[in-house]
Amino acid sequence: MKKTRKLKNYIIWNSFLSIIIPIILIGTLTAYLLFAFIKNDISQKNTVIADTISHRLNGLVNESFLSLYQLRNLLETEVLNDDFQINTYLQTSLESSSIIQSLELIDETGIVKNIAPDNLNLLGSNQSGQSFFSDSQLTKTDYTSSIFISQRTGQPTLALSTPFNKGVVVAFLDLSRINLESLGLNQAFGDQISIAITDEKGTLISHDDMNKVYQRDKEENFEIIQNSNTDPSAIFTANYNGQTMLVNKSSLNNMNWFVFVYQSYASILQILRSILGITLLVTLLLVIISRVMAHFVFRTIDLSFSELNSQTKDIATGHYQLINVDNNFAEFETLTGNFNQMVERIKDRDETLQNLAYYDLSTNLPNDTYLLKHLEQFIEDDLAKIAVICFNIQNFKRINDTYGPKFGDAVLQKTGQRILSKPRDKAFTARSTSSNFIRVAYNMTNIKSIIDEIKDFQALFNEAIVINENKVYLRFYVGLALYPDHSLTAENLLQYAHMAADSAKLQGKRKIVFFETTMKKHLLHNMNLEISLQSALSKNQLFLHYQPQINVNNQEIRGFEALLRWQHPQLGNIPPLDFIGIAESTGLIIAIGEWVLKTACQRIISFNQTMNRQTMISVNISPIQMEHDGFLQMVQSVLEETGLNPNLLELEITENVLIHSHQESLEIFKQIKAMGVKLSLDDFGTGYSSLSYLKNLPIDTLKIDQAFTRDLLIKGSHENLMESMITMAHILKMKVIVEGVEELKQFDRLKSFCCDCVQGYYFSKPIPESELENYSRLNKL
Amino acid sequence: MIWKFKKYRLLVVLVFLLWLLLSACSQKTLSIGYSASLTGTNSELGVIGRNGLMLAVDTVNSTGGVNGQEVNLIIKDDKNNPQTALTVDQELYDAGVNFIIGHMTSNMAEHSLPFINEHDLLMISPTMSSQTLSKRDDHLLRVVSSNEAEIEFMAKTIKQAGNYKKIAIIYEAQNEAYTLTSKSILISLLQENGSSIIKDLPFESGNNPPYWDIANEILDSEADCIVILASSFDAALFCQQFYKLGMNKPLFLPTWAMNNNLIIQGGPAVEGIHISSLFDPNSEDPNYLKFKENYQDKYGDLPSFSAVYTYEAAMILFDAIETSQTTDPAVIKKTILDTKTYQGLQNEISIDRFGDATRKIYNYTIKNRQFEKGDE
């Protein structure tokens, strides 16, 4: 997973680093240069100190020599010519000198003739072995000794000697005084340096630690310094007791003495430390300033970011609003512009998707999804009362059948336009199923307002819809359910409104039907039937009754029509009208239809065999069965299995079969006919079949609906209609069976119309299968 | 692979440098102590000995140290005072020192030796020769012979020089561990020869001793010869007093007084004196000649016996540490004792089981301001 970081931290850190890194680099370089500068400066200063001490020492030594020269002159000029004078002079000279601790006058044989201060041990001793005597005597020049233990003091000393005409005069130096002189200078230059003075062999003459002098220590790095330091200005470093020191050296004029000035590196670092302290302080200040500046810089950016974040968060939650961020950065402007483009595109896309999801393309009205969603919202908002009104277009099927499906679509489109033209004040209308429109009106105060709402809707269709010069007047079956009176859920309300509309349709009246609980019971009843029907076949609850069809001329049995019956264990006999529709809607009709066909065929074979007759059997076929792919195969199989002569089987179809696809139906009819099976058209006169297509159907028998039989004797016009239909059928080479014959008069009249066969209670109601033979025998038909 | 090496090359180099740095930092040093009188009139022995020791340290460090450890020399001044000697030994012990070269005069052993023994240090003395320190199984080893041998040699020299019967002895009283035992031995030996000590005069060095008075007292006696048991500084001054008094009686000095300062400070006054010398200034041994050359280069002076003996003491110690590969004083002592003989700069050094050495003794005199070896 990619690691992310906060912009604020990024900016602050980068600004911090952009300051701290250059400071570190510059600081390091500066510290290095500063160190080199300070080192060089200290070295120069210490060289000056060393030279100063050398100069001072030179002065002291020269001063001592001058004392010796004066003594020499006095002796050679014999100004001093006896021991008393000489001793007095020596004592005086000694007292006037700052560094001479002892003076001696040695004769040419090396015998100490005079000495100051008095020293009995040395007076008269022979010093000819001492270099200060022998060298001076021999070379006749001044001499400066190396350090040695003084016989006078038992401490280290240096001897200065100069020859005179009768021997040598010697001055012994007090090293502690020399040390004091250098210490004085040392203190004058601060306590960061230390000073050492050595003789030509490196033996210490003076040092801060005089014990080293008394112990005749050598300067620790004398040889190394002497061998390496050819350039007087060179900076030399050496280690002393584990401490690195800067060493500067100076030589005394005319003497092989050396002055060393030491300063530790630590003192340089001490100087640097204060500078580094200031640098650190400045760095800290800069860091704080950078932090504050970064904070302010970021705050400006952060404001833009926060606003952008806040608005994009709305977008992320689905509220696609255009971003309007006021900021000072061009980058943000571009970003905002890009976001807004994206938002526009998303909104367009969502609108399209919403249209597809929530609107019906035929009418541009909201669809079921929209309907359900909004109805649920109204309920959630408790916008009582809510009226869910179902408007079902009356006879829409007929319009479709009459003018074709495209016309029907155009009608729906116009319907949508008219509905949309109505202001959506506290209401909206959706298209539910094909010819159903649901209007949802909320905040209804009373029934009257609901009725007014319905009337307003119906008023939209007072004028005919004109399509291709065809005028259609739309009327509606209206059913409605109310929230919260009838239900608290959207689904139920919709269902109840549909039920109420269906109820209105059943009642066939142009009135408004309010949902009633009984409708719900009816619905529940149907549901129970549907569940029971699933197992009715396997539980042998289904059986067939047979109604005889009587030839009019000889009043013999032409055949029987097989009629399905259902003996429900709890509900008793269920009328076919109550469950056929359920069987069709659930698809159970396929299995049931096959069973009916097979059972009827077997029974008529049994009957014919028993009665030695060629009686026909008529079996009703549902349009659903006809549409099923295996229908023809099923009929063929039943015929083969039962062995029934196809000519004795007549399949009764209704005009509904022709609704969906006239051409496909014709093809199936032809194949049925090809099997030798006969076809009859049931319930003729109740549908909308026209004579134009009737003539093209391969129908053998036309069954005229009992409705015509009922009215036959009431009006003369009805008789004419019956007669015309029979005549027409005959013209079309069809036999005619008239259903619903219940009286002799009806029979006689039909006979006079040359009707071929009749069927009805006059001859027999449908009878159980076990009674077919008895019926035939008893009635001698 | 090459890329990877290049990538990590800097890291490898840095780690290596760090390792070198840490190695350098963690390199141990071998600290040894040196305790001697470095100030005052008796300091010649200690100062010259220190110079010899520093040459030894320079030599061993220039060849990589001892077992790879650089030798760090810690020098202490015992001021020829036994109490100070104890103090400085304690300081050395506190500084983590296991080995002390020193002290240089026998009287320092009084407090120092018990401390050394108690704390299991190892002391190798170049010049403490008192017989009282002999035949002890202690933590003191010596590269110098017992003063018994030296005094025996002196007694023999006196006898050979003139069989003197009346002998005066001047001795430095502070270093009584050496001078008193020497005197006692000498008296005993001389008495065997029928000689007698007619004068027995102590003095204390460094406290403006009455050289002149003592010399006059000797002069007033009937002594045939004079034995001075003192350092070169004091001996030279006594000789000067005798010179001033015009006394030409034979003078006999121990090795203690034998260094160039005796000649320089004594001048004609020390001509002809007899020295029982524990070293041979005129040795032609290449080791010694090399040492002498180095010493002169460094200090501009000739080495004396204390320089030679201190150098040898240090070299014996370094050799034992290298041989035993340890710095445990007990092991080092055992190693030295087991080795028994070492080749010194001039002659062989035999060390017995008590850590007492036997060295060759030379008869020296001063002629024409030079040490001159006499008959052996």
Image: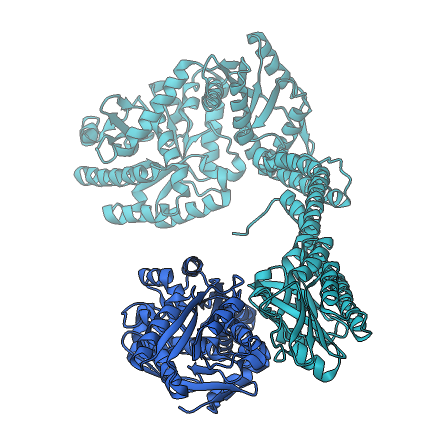
Position of residue B251 relative to residue B137, above or below, is below
Q: Nearer the viewer, residue A334 or A132?
A: A132
Specify the chain shown as blue.
B
- The colour of chain A is cyan
Could you tell me which residue is drawn at 56 percent across and 7 percent down?
A446
Q: Quadrant of residue B245?
A: bottom right
Horizontal relation, residue A540 to residue B181: left or right: left
Q: Quadrant of residue B87?
A: bottom left
Q: Nearer the viewer, residue B89 or A175?
A: A175
Could you tell me which residue is drawn at 61 percent across and 65 percent down?
A119
Horizontal relation, residue A487 to residue A773: left or right: right
Position of residue A252 relative to residue B110, above or below, is below
Q: Nearer the viewer, residue B10 or A400?
A: B10
Could you tell me which residue is drawn at 55 percent across and 8 percent down?
A447
Q: Position of residue A103 (x, y in %)?
A: 69, 67
Q: Nearer the viewer, residue A356 or B170?
A: B170
Q: Position of residue A547 (x, y in %)?
A: 29, 29
Q: Is residue B328 visible?
A: yes
